[in-house]
Image (tube, rainbow, N blue to C red):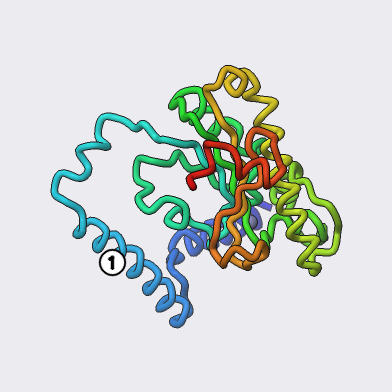
């Protein structure tokens, strides 16, 4: 019995040590090359970014931040801050998650609004949002952690291959997130310290305004596009 236990122990130790000795980098050569190119891209991008800045650029960031807005966007790789702010450093307190949701990022958003006191909260969805499509189609293979993060996405149908329905669901979700935020920050909005703006980054040209345009669809709960366009805060003509 003792000999048997010793053998088991040795086998366990050997397998543990082989796991620990395993290289964290991909074994497959082509995967390794791919990762190397990705890392190179990030390092070179960072290098180019730093080199084009004036020498004292970062001194403005050292003693804190005063962003102009808290912004919640989907984590989708097709939507990035450079599409919404030419120079986002220091400007945007940015919160990203699948489906640009408020409840799944409550603390981060609250920090932006109640501690950094940003006067605007943007909630930005986008064309062909995969999170919205998943909330519509409810595919069975998704992990529980992903399901939990789809919980507060509000959609208007279940046909994720129907563009009109996806567009309506993207809007419905943005409006739902704005309404959730309006309930939580009712006092700030009422006292005029906060404006909550919902928008859609339209890279499919669903709104026929040109691909890549930001379409404002909700301002403090107002969803009528004509009324929004007349508001002084969004009308610059
Ligand atoms: Zn998305």
Identify the image quadrant of residue 229. Answer: top right
Q: Which residue is mark 1?
A: 44
- Quick one: label 1, few (<14), some, or many (20+) residues within 10 Å? few
Image side of residue 206 versus residue 135, left or right: left
Q: Position of residue 194 (x, y in %)?
A: 54, 27
Identify the image quadrant of residue 161. Answer: bottom right
Residue visible at 46% across and 65% down in the picture: 22
Image side of residue 161 versus residue 66, left or right: right
Number of numbered discs on residues:
1
Q: Position of residue 96 (x, y in %)?
A: 55, 47
Residue visible at 13% across and 49% down in the picture: 55
- Badge 1 marks a residue whose secondary structure is helix
Identify whether 202 is placed above or below 233: below
Residue visible at 43% across and 76% down in the picture: 34
Q: Position of residue 98 (x, y in %)?
A: 63, 51
Identify whether 178 is placed above or below 160: above
List the single residue furthest toward the front: 237
Residue visible at 62% across and 24% down in the picture: 185
Image side of residue 210 versus residue 162, left or right: left
Q: Nearer the viewer, residue 185 or 17?
A: 185
Answer yes or no: disc 1 within 8 Å of ligand 1.
no
Q: Nearer the viewer, residue 150 or 175?
A: 175
Identify whether 28 is placed above or below 158: below
Q: Position of residue 137 (x, y in %)?
A: 82, 60
List the single residue furthest toward the bottom: 30
Q: Nearer the viewer, residue 172 or 130?
A: 172
Ligand 1, by image quadrant, is bottom right
């Amino acid at each position: 019995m003792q000999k048997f236990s010793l053998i088991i122990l040795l086998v366990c130790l050997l397998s543990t040590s082989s796991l620990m000795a395993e290289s964290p980098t991909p074994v497959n050569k082509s995967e390794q090359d791919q990762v190397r190119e990705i890392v190179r891209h990030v390092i070179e991008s960072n290098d180019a970014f730093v080199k084009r800045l004036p020498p004292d650029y970062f001194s403005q960031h050292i003693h804190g931040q005063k962003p102009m807005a808290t912004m919640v966007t989907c984590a989708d790789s097709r939507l990035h801050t450079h599409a919404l702010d030419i120079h986002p450093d220091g400007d945007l307190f940015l919160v990203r998650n699948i489906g640009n949701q408020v409840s799944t990022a409550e603390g981060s958003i609250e920090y932006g609004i109640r501690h950094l006191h940003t006067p605007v909260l943007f909630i930005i969805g986008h064309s062909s949002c995969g999170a919205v499509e998943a909330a519509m189609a409810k595919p069975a293979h998704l992990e529980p952690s992903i399901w939990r993060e789809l919980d507060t996405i509000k959609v208007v149908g279940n046909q994720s291959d129907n563009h009109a329905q996806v567009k309506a669901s993207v809007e419905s979700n943005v409006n739902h997130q704005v309404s959730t935020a309006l309930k939580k920050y009712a006092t700030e909005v009422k006292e005029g310290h906060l404006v909550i703006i919902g928008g859609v980054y339209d890279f499919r040209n669903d709104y026929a305004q040109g691909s890549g345009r930001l379409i404002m669809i909700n301002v403090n709960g107002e969803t009528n596009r004509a009324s929004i366009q007349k508001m002084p805060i969004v009308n610059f003509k």
